[in-house]
Image: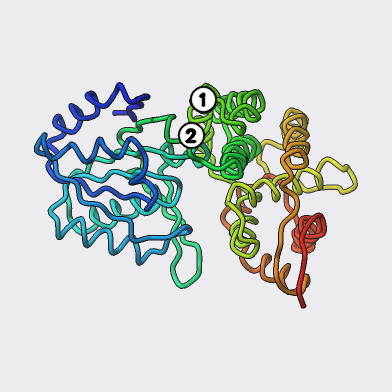
Amino acid sequence: MGQMILEGREMADRVQSWLHEHGVHDILLVHGRSATELPCFSFFQHLPSAGIYVHSFSDFQPNPLLASAEKGAVVFADEGCDMIVALGGGSAMDVAKVVKLLVLRKGAGDVPFLAIPTTAGTGSEATHFAVVYKDGVKQSVQDDCLLPDLAWFLPEVLASLPIYQRKATALDAFCHAFESFWSIHSNAQSQEYSRRALDGIQKIADGYVHGNAAAGCEMMRLAHLAGMAIDITQTTAGHAMCYELTHLAGIAHGHAAALCVDALGAFLYRGETLWECIDSRGKEYLQGVLFELQPSWQWLHNRMDDWQLREIYVKGPRKETVSCLLDAIHPMRLRNFPIHLRLKDYASLFYQILETGAAYES
């Protein structure tokens, strides 16, 4: 059975019925600490009166650790939980997904999984992927069981997001759709998802950033659509490059991804280099893909200027910073990129990103 999507607070009774239909008695609620301040949190506070008990787990951080998911799995077992709910952004989603995988590996039966995103960017509720860190190294997890059974969109949760987070999450969704489109794993379905997401985000992004409620509703749908695209294709070089940049510059993930995708586009569309196509469909096919994407890249390039997102700060000598960024590139995501670039090309891209707006200390 496919994933069920519900939207709006008026669906609360339908969600509660869904819980009863699945025989749920004890929920592990994985959420960020600020989620308790959201209006929708009251839904879980009232569930005990319906015979459904909720056990909160928020012992994790952004870019969550595998150890945090392991703690969550212990709480799940100790409290006798029979369902997992993720309420939050990408970190809460990742922790909840890995908790589910861990408890299934320990012999648990069916574990229903509800995702309630509190941002409009990651699209994590639409994918069977998760990311956690172990010993400082990013670990990508992939399993069909990680796709939530039910996704509940509550657009009012976006009202409290700061403008910077709105920008970053909108760009994260945009980069998902953009990278999926040129991925070597793209197909007609994924590219249709990407087209719709790219076109829609360009139309509503400014309204969303400035707090338009209707644009917020639509951004949640578009982020989910972009998530459906990357669930087919996975991300590519832009995301392969961005994780350590997020850490070193102290910026949001979507901001870092946009800097990298923008730099990749500038590199390719300059036409100053002969690139090697590694997509099995051939160079002529890839040229068509890049031609179709060029207006979207131009929109991204302009938006980075308009939204004043080029100025970042990285502490340390530039050469050492670039070396660190190169060491942290995720090789699996590079293999999804349709163009073979050399290590010196990626170094050049990082220098370009850093020279645009970064400051340094020796």
Local SS, label 1: helix
Q: Is residue 192 visible?
A: yes
User: Residue 359 location in percent, x, y?
Assistant: 77, 64
Residue flagged by tag 2: what amino acid is it? Ala
Q: Residue at x 58, y 52 (%)?
A: 252
Would you place residue 41 above or below residue 67 in this image?
above
Residue flagged by tag 1: what amino acid is it? Ala
Q: Residue at x 14, y 31 (%)?
A: 20
Q: Nearer the viewer, residue 126 or 215?
A: 215
Residue 213's mark? Answer: 1
Q: Mark 1: give few (<14), some (14-19) or many (20+) Cα within 10 Å.
A: some
Q: Residue at x 64, y 60 (%)?
A: 245
Q: Quadrant of the N terminus?
A: top left
Q: Mark 2: give few (<14), some (14-19) or many (20+) Cα within 10 Å.
A: some
Q: Residue furthest right?
A: 272
Q: Nearer the viewer, residue 25 or 346?
A: 25
Q: Residue furthest bottom?
A: 362
User: Residue 80 location in percent, x, y?
Assistant: 12, 53
Task: Determine which residue is flagged by label 2.
Answer: 159
Q: Is residue 334 left or right of residue 88?
A: right
Find residue 324 and report its image quarter. bottom right
Find residue 197 and report its image quarter. top right
- Badge 2 or badge 1: first in the primary sequence: 2
Measured Cα–Cα span from mark 2 to mark 1: 8 Å
Q: Residue at x 26, y 37 (%)?
A: 42
2 and 1 marks in contact (CB < 8 Å)? yes
User: Residue 224 location in percent, x, y?
Assistant: 48, 32
Q: Quadrant of the C terminus?
A: bottom right
Q: Is residue 50 left or right of residue 228?
A: left
User: Residue 338 location in percent, x, y?
Assistant: 68, 44
Would you place residue 338 above or below residue 62 in this image?
above
